[in-house]
Image (tube, rainbow, N blue to C red):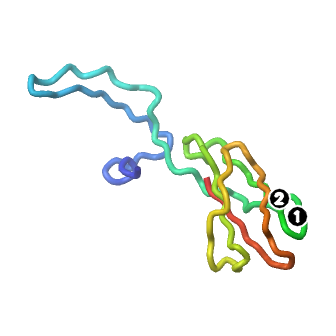
Amino acid sequence: MNLFRESSFSLTFKTLIVARARATNAIGDGPFSDLNLTGVRIMTEPEAPMNAPTVLSYDETSAELGIQLLTGDSTGGSVILYYEIEWDSGSLGATWMPYTILTATQDNLLITGLSSGAKYSFKYRA
């Protein structure tokens, strides 16, 4: 949701949102709550990974890829649930399709079904 980053709010990452609320119904208005002064901050999308996947090992029909997991502010303040690996199936980057999804803590993946002599490209995102 980009609402809080658009005009007139223009809030930046980690900005504290200070708010209070009250209920309104047919009988009238309730009292305002206390101000929230902790805990609610602007989060954003995770950043793109800094490095492409690396080939850790390979043979004629498979390759083991390694990825760099996002940490700290690069997560956008969000909990990373998984990473998606995409590959070009040997199309030299002409088409991309999902290969698999990794857990948030898995930093390597065995790719199988490769053909000897073909060139493959891989990318990933959180």
* 121 relative to 66, above or below: below
Which residue occupies the extreme front position in the image? 113
Q: Secondary structure at mark 2?
A: strand
- Which numbered disc covers residue 105? none
Local crowd size for mark 1, using a 10 Å CA cut-off: few (<14), some (14–19), many (≥20) = some
* 69 relative to 115, above or below: above
Tell me what residue is drawn at x 64 percent, y 52 percent: 83
Tell me what residue is drawn at x 64 percent, y 41 percent: 72
Q: Secondary structure at mark 1?
A: strand
Front residue of this view, candidates 103 and 22: 103
Q: Position of residue 39 (x, y in %)?
A: 47, 29
Asked whether, in this view, residue 56 is left or right of residue 126, the answer is right
Residue 110, quarter of the rendered image: bottom right
Q: Are marks 1 and 2 in contact (CB under 8 Å)?
A: yes
**Which residue is labeled 2 in the image?**
64
Residue 18, quarter of the rendered image: top left
Asked whether, in this view, residue 48 is left or right of residue 55, the answer is left
Local crowd size for mark 2, using a 10 Å CA cut-off: few (<14), some (14–19), many (≥20) = some
Tell me what residue is drawn at x 57 percent, y 50 percent: 46
Front residue of this view, candidates 104 and 20: 104
Q: Position of residue 60 (x, y in %)?
A: 89, 70
Q: CA distance from mark 1 to mark 2?
A: 6 Å
**Which residue is labeled 1 in the image?**
58
Q: Earlier in the sequence, mark 1 or mark 2?
A: 1
Asked whether, in this view, residue 64 is left or right of residue 122, the answer is right
Tell me what residue is drawn at x 79 percent, y 77 percent: 119
Give amino acid for label 2: Glu
Q: Position of residue 51 (x, y in %)?
A: 73, 59
Give amino acid for label 1: Tyr
